[in-house]
Image: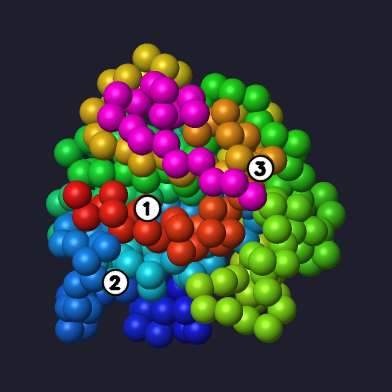
Amino acid sequence: MTAESAPDATTRDVPIGALTVRLHEVGDPREGGPREADPRAGEGPPVLWLHGAGAGNDGATTWGNIVPALPGRRHLAPDLAGFGGSTLPEPMPHGLAAITGARIAALVDLLDVLDVPVVDVVGHSLGGLSALALLADHPTRVRRAVLVAGGGVPLRTGPLLKPMITWYADGTAEAMRAWLVDTVADPAATYPTHGQTGRVDLDDVVARRMASAADPAVRAAHESTFARDGEPMAYDGDALARIEHPVLVVHGRDDLVLPPAYGRYLAEHLPHADLVELDRCGHWPHWEHPDSVAEHLGRFLQT
């Protein structure tokens, strides 16, 4: 959450045993409590925002434009373990399944340290996989879930996933920028040149991600997550059928990273899921259509 988009946001490093979780937070009750409730958000537990993959990504960069649109709640947007300022156990877990397990353990420990018994969770892309893992393995810690361009199902990925995985082969800001532009349906609307409330500053995103991606630990975590010899991780129809939580699935019809079939699969197999598909929308619904996504999230999380 950048200072421009969320002026009351705080960032702190939370010790979790031998690990550290960097937490970006809005509405911390220790700092005066949540702001006046918004009727779109209603009262409810804290909202846990889980960002996706990609070199240099983190909680603040992913969610900074959308959290201010949902006042009245406490918002927790940690850097997942191995991203930003959050650490992984040593030796580092190897492969998607192992590293996701470590990330979920760190999240549960974080909630315990914060004395937060239950959350609503919002996960984007790889964060959607993490949200599914929370729902499946720690069902009592979650009330409702939102999967935004969510991953974690056994389908073929889109053509723009590989450039994200292999970005370190080039490792330049130009490649980072090009990928971010390619993954949205309308770059001019998503990244306006003169600034617009609720929109995304592409220069800021690239600069923040490049600074974080230069950290050797962040690179090692990225490479471990996508190691070819690592154990994969996906939730098939039978696994999804056992998740009883209310779930909102939000997906763009023009997503070239995780195609819209991902959202439809989730909505078909989760027993209590609703699907919102957005036109002229790629892999970043909350960046490309922030007002619409905020409205859908606010209404769903209010229930």
- With 213 as the anchor, is 59 left or right in this view? left
At which x and y percent is residue 199?
Answer: 56, 71
Residue 147 percent across, percent down from the top left: 42, 43
- Between residue 19 and residue 161, name the one nearer to us: 161
Q: Is residue 266 inside the magenta stretch?
A: yes
The magenta span reads 264-280
Q: Residue at x 50, y 84 (%)?
A: 4
Q: Are marks 3 and 1 in contact (CB under 8 Å)?
A: no
Q: Secondary structure at mark 1?
A: helix
Which of the pair 276/27 is nearer the observer?
Answer: 276
What residue type is disc 2 on? Pro
- Distance from the alpha carbon under mark 2 to that under mark 3: 29 Å
Residue shown at 73% from the left, 42% from the top: 160
Disc marking residue 254: 3
Contact (Cβ within 8 Å) of mark 2 with mark 3: no
Circles 2 and 1, Cβ within 8 Å, touching? The answer is no
Q: Residues within 10 Å of mark 1 (few under 14, many from 20)?
A: some
Q: Position of residue 129 (x, y in %)?
A: 45, 38
- Amino acid type assigned to the residue bearing label 3 in the image: Asp
Which disc number belongs to residue 71? Answer: 2
In the depicted structure, whether residue 293 falls above or below residue 197: above
Residue 256 numbered mark, or none: none
Q: Residue furthest front?
A: 279
- In the rendered image, which residue does mark 1 sit on? 296
- Tell me the kind of residue under disc 1: His
Q: Is residue 192 magenta?
A: no
Q: Mark 2 vs mark 3: which is more N-terminal? A: 2
